[in-house]
């Protein structure tokens, strides 16, 4: 097998051309073996991020948050909103209110009354949809910031008017009340959402 022809500096040759007699071919010059210089495009952003983190940590320590608060900030685990009701225990108790139900298109479907009881620890609860004479149990399935999400399982529906399963989301509302959102899918496959304020 023939070896690849060498390139002469400052010229472009056809691989089939032979070098001119008396003019020995030379290797290509000005090739750098060093990596290209690093980009400093992100250096300013890094400096600003480090400065912001340092200021935030100093503020947490000065406010008495101590090592745990500083670690939580660095860990990024506590970026959720802190409110007066961010503690799940603040949801414990009996709540009631009127719910407004809409379908997928946002068309009003019904208004109904709900009673919700959250047990100590906020892991479980019960509810009664008094307008429809339905009731069921609540089990905490997720916590998203200061929102608690409960899975509802029906235990009584004497008139067969309610869904068997739905999801209840609670989060802090105005004046010590709580916002509530029920989300469910009917037997016909229509998604229904009911919202209201419980006190």
Image: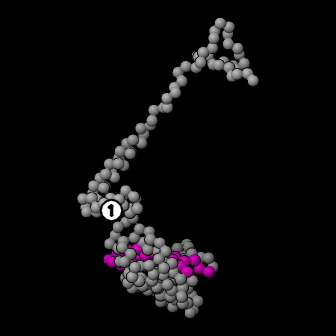
Q: Where is residue 121 in the image (x, y as percent from the top left)?
A: 40, 79
Decide which of 64, 1 is in the foreground and name it. 1
Q: Position of residue 3 (x, y in %)?
A: 70, 22
Check if residue 105 falls in the magenta segment: no
Q: Is residue 39 above or below residue 133?
A: above
Decide which of 111, 56 is in the foreground and name it. 56
In the picture as drawn, the residue positioned furthest to the bottom comes out as 158
Q: Please give the residue where the numbered disc 1 appears in the rendered image.
A: 68
Q: In this view, does 17 lie above or below 191?
A: above
Decide which of 27, 1 is in the foreground and name it. 1
Image coloring type: one colour
**Where on the picture, by quarter, is residue 45?**
top left
Viewport quadrant of the C terminus: bottom left
Element at badge 1? helix
In the picture as drawn, the residue positioned furthest to the right comes out as 1
Check if residue 180 falls in the magenta segment: yes
Residue 106 in the figure: left or right of residue 196: right
In the picture as drawn, the residue positioned furthest to the top comes out as 22
Q: Which residue is drawn at 52% across and 27% down?
A: 33
**Where on the picture, by quarter, is residue 90?**
bottom left
Give the residues in magenta.
Answer: 165-187
Residue 84 in the figure: left or right of residue 20: left
Q: In this view, does 70 lie above or below 136?
A: above
Q: Residue at x 32, y 72 (%)?
A: 84
Q: Which residue is drawn at 35% across and 59% down?
A: 71
Decide which of 100, 168 is in the foreground and name it. 168
Viewport quadrant of the N terminus: top right
Q: Which residue is drawn at 62% across and 76% down?
A: 189
The reply to whether residue 41 is visible in this rendering is yes
């Amino acid at each position: 097998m023939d070896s690849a022809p060498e390139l002469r500096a400052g010229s472009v040759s056809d691989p089939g051309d032979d070098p001119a007699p008396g003019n020995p071919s030379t290797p290509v010059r000005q090739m750098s073996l060093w990596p290209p210089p690093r980009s400093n495009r992100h250096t300013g952003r890094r400096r600003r991020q480090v400065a912001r983190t340092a200021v935030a940590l100093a503020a947490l320590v000065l406010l008495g948050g101590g090592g745990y608060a500083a670690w939580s900030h660095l860990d990024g685990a506590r970026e959720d909103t802190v409110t007066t009701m961010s503690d799940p225990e603040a949801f414990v108790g009996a709540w009631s209110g009127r719910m407004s139900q809409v379908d997928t298109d946002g068309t009003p479907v019904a208004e109904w009354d709900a009673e919700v009881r959250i047990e100590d620890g906020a892991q479980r609860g019960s509810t009664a949809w008094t307008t429809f004479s339905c009731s069921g149990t609540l089990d905490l399935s997720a916590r998203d910031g200061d929102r608690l999400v409960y899975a509802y399982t029906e235990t009584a529906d004497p008139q067969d008017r309610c869904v068997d399963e739905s999801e209840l989301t609670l989060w802090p509302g105005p004046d010590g009340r709580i916002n509530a959102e029920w989300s469910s899918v009917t037997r016909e496959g229509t998604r229904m959402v009911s919202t209201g304020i419980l006190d």
